[in-house]
Amino acid sequence: MNKFFSAIVLCCAALLAQPVMAQTVFAVEFKTGPRWDKAKQAHEQAHFADHSANLKKLREQGRLLIGARYADKGLLLITAESAEELRLLIEADPAVVHQVFVYDIHPFNVFYPGCVALRGKTC
């Protein structure tokens, strides 16, 4: 067995040893909730720092694929095994718990894959 083939076999064995989780991509749309203070900027809202920390945790877990704002809404693309699992993750967010944000979850079915990158960055 040559070294190249041996390396492929070892890599495949390592991948197969990892737990496999079926992941679906969901779009989570955040809107301002009943406890949003219109007199304050987003970063000044109650529980906003905790919300940001929660998003950072999701990103570090590899679940948060992209986050963006448009108009007065936020949009996250997040992977989860199910909408129920994702709902539990989102409902643990302090800004959601305290009604600073409300949210909707939608399946996100990619039909034309591509890349979204920040200016000056590549995929």
Image (cartoon, grey):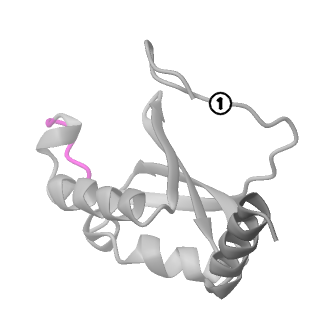
Q: Residue at x 47, y 51 (%)?
A: 30
Q: Residue at x 35, y 67 (%)?
A: 96
User: Residue reaching furthest right?
Assistant: 111
The residue closer to the viewer here, 99 or 93, is 93
What is the chief secondary structure element of the magenta stretch? Answer: loop
Is the residue 16 above or below the residue 103 in the image?
below
The residue closer to the viewer here, 3 or 60, is 3
Residue 9 lies, in percent from the top left, at 75, 73
Residue 61 lies, in percent from the top left, at 42, 66
Q: Quadrant of residue 35?
A: bottom left
Which element is circle 1 on?
loop
Is the residue 111 above or below the residue 12 in the image?
above
Residue 116 lies, in percent from the top left, at 59, 28
Q: Residue at x 57, y 82 (%)?
A: 85
What quarter of the picture does the C terminus occupy?
Answer: top right
* Label tally: 1
Q: Quadrant of residue 95?
A: bottom left
Residue 29 lies, in percent from the top left, at 54, 50
On whether residue 82 falls in the magenta region, the answer is no
Amino acid type of the residue tagged 1 in the rendering? Cys
Q: Which residue is label 1 attached to?
A: 115
| Residue 70 visible within the image | yes
> How busy is the neighbourhood of tag 1: few (under 14 within 10 Å), some, or many (20 plus)?
few
Question: Which segment is the magenta one?
Answer: 36-40
The residue closer to the viewer here, 46 or 27, is 27
The residue closer to the viewer here, 53 or 98, is 53
Q: Is residue 95 left or right of residue 10?
A: left
| Residue 75 visible within the image | no
Q: Is residue 34 left or right of residue 61?
A: left
Is the residue 34 above or below the residue 86 in the image?
above
